[in-house]
């Protein structure tokens, strides 16, 4: 050690080291004092995490029922990516796909108990406990997925979301999959009367059951994991489904026809435990909400681009794929609007708003 250095007291040395370290960290600090996250990704326009945000270090649990190649899983991964980036790596989610944590009913219970932090629950399932959710299933109410997404972010969409409460649940946002189609084992359906007497699987949900009853079909309420074997063994003749789940669950192996009706949109609701969510800091809550918003928009934009590809995949797997439009179900649309507008003032306003 040199003579000069020996003369500098230890406290002074520490001070010099501290000042040098502070100078070098300034390179990562913007003029407004915000520190750039190491995972900054400007393409999503998101990811600056401020050092003075009040954030816990936490790994949340998120569960859903779809396979890992379904858009809901990809959107869940996008949510995780955003969460990590916006919190500077402090917050993230562990994702449990494909009903690993049980059915929708099981997941709702686990969110209520606080053992899962987030779950994607179909609007259809929720309509049995939150009747206002039925508004989303007004047939042919939206021109496109983007149109449905815009409604989900509007006052009327948020008002419906706010009804997903009770036993400690809170609905944070919507996440859409593709619109609904009809998959048939043996029978080509070209008009509503072709459905007469057919055992058509629906997600357990009053508005879906009502719609199929109005066509003359015999709706059978079955959760998603039971559908493959039900159609394979002839327990059902067909199903209400989306193209995404038709592909990811390989229904082309057991069904011949895909009528691309696009008769209803298919929102899930991202639910959380109200008490746990309220217990998080405002900063953490805002990051979760903003990250979900990015994931929800990601799902809609990417899903819309997959429509034609999904149809040709099913054709190449041997299915007969054809389009059916709203004119086929004119009287069913009128019947739905009349029945559900009479059930709730909010549903009536929703239908009036979206059909304008
Ligand atoms: C269904 O029950 O049909 C379903 C549920 C979640 C995603 C896709 C389809």
Image (cartoon, rainbow, N blue to C red):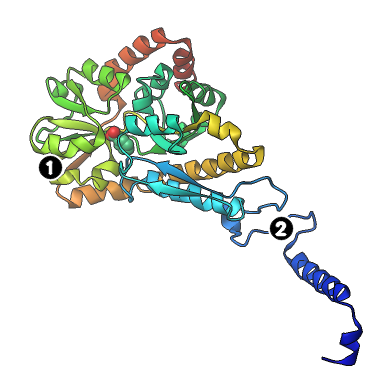
Pick whichever, 82 or 16, lies toward us: 16
| Residue positioned 88% across, 74% down in the render | 12
Neighbor class of circle 2 (other Cα within 10 Å; few <14, some 14-19, many 20+) is: some
Q: Earlier in the sequence, mark 1 or mark 2?
A: 2
- Image position, residue 264 (x, y; %): 34, 29
In the picture, measured across the screen, residue 304 lies left or right of residue 290, that is left
Q: Describe the element under mark 1 as helix, strand or loop.
A: loop
- Image position, residue 214 (x, y; %): 23, 15
Q: Is residue 260 visible?
A: no
Pointer 2 residue: 35
| Residue positioned 37% across, 14% down in the render | 337
- Image position, residue 3 (x, y; %): 89, 91
Neighbor class of circle 1 (other Cα within 10 Å; few <14, some 14-19, many 20+) is: some
| Residue positioned 39% across, 33% down in the render | 110
Pointer 1 residue: 254
Pick whichever, 320 or 174, lies toward us: 174
In the picture, measured across the screen, residue 53 lies left or right of residue 221, that is right
Residue projecting furthest to the top: 342
Please state which of the two labelled residues, at mark 1 or mark 2, is closer to the viewer.
Answer: 2
């Amino acid at each position: 050690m040199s003579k000069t250095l020996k003369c500098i007291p230890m406290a002074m040395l520490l001070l010099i080291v501290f000042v040098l370290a502070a100078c070098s960290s300034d390179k990562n600090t913007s003029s407004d004092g915000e520190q750039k996250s190491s995972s900054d990704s400007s393409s999503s326009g998101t990811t600056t995490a401020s050092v003075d945000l009040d954030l816990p270090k936490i790994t949340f649990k998120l569960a859903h029922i779809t396979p890992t190649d379904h858009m809901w899983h990809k959107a869940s991964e996008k949510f995780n990516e955003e969460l990590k980036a916006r919190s500077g790596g402090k917050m993230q989610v562990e994702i449990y796909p494909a009903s690993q944590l049980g059915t929708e009913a099981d997941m709702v219970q686990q969110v209520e108990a606080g053992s899962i932090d987030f779950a994607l629950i179909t609007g259809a399932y929720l309509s049995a406990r939150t009747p206002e959710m039925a508004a989303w299933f007004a047939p042919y109410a939206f021109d496109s997925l983007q149109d449905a997404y815009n409604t989900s972010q509007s006052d009327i969409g948020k008002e419906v979301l706010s009804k997903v409460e009770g036993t400690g649940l809170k609905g944070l946002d919507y996440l859409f999959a593709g619109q609904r189609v009809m998959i048939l084992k043996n029978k080509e359906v070209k008009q509503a009367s072709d459905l007469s007497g057919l055992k058509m699987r629906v997600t357990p949900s009053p508005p879906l059951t009502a719609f199929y009853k109005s066509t003359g079909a015999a709706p059978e309420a079955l959760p998603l994991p039971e559908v493959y074997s039900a159609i394979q063994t002839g327990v059902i003749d067909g199903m209400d489904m989306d193209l995404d789940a038709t592909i990811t669950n390989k229904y082309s192996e057991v069904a011949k026809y895909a009528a691309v009706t696009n008769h209803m949109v298919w929102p899930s609701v991202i639910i959380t435990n109200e008490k746990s969510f309220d217990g998080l800091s405002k900063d953490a809550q805002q990051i979760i909400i903003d990250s979900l918003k990015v994931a929800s928009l990601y799902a809609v934009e990417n899903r819309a681009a997959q429509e034609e590809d999904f149809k040709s995949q099913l054709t190449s797997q041997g299915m007969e794929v054809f389009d059916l439009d709203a004119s086929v179900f004119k009287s069913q649309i009128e019947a739905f609007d009349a029945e559900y507008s009479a059930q709730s003032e909010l549903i009536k306003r929703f239908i009036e708003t979206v059909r304008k």
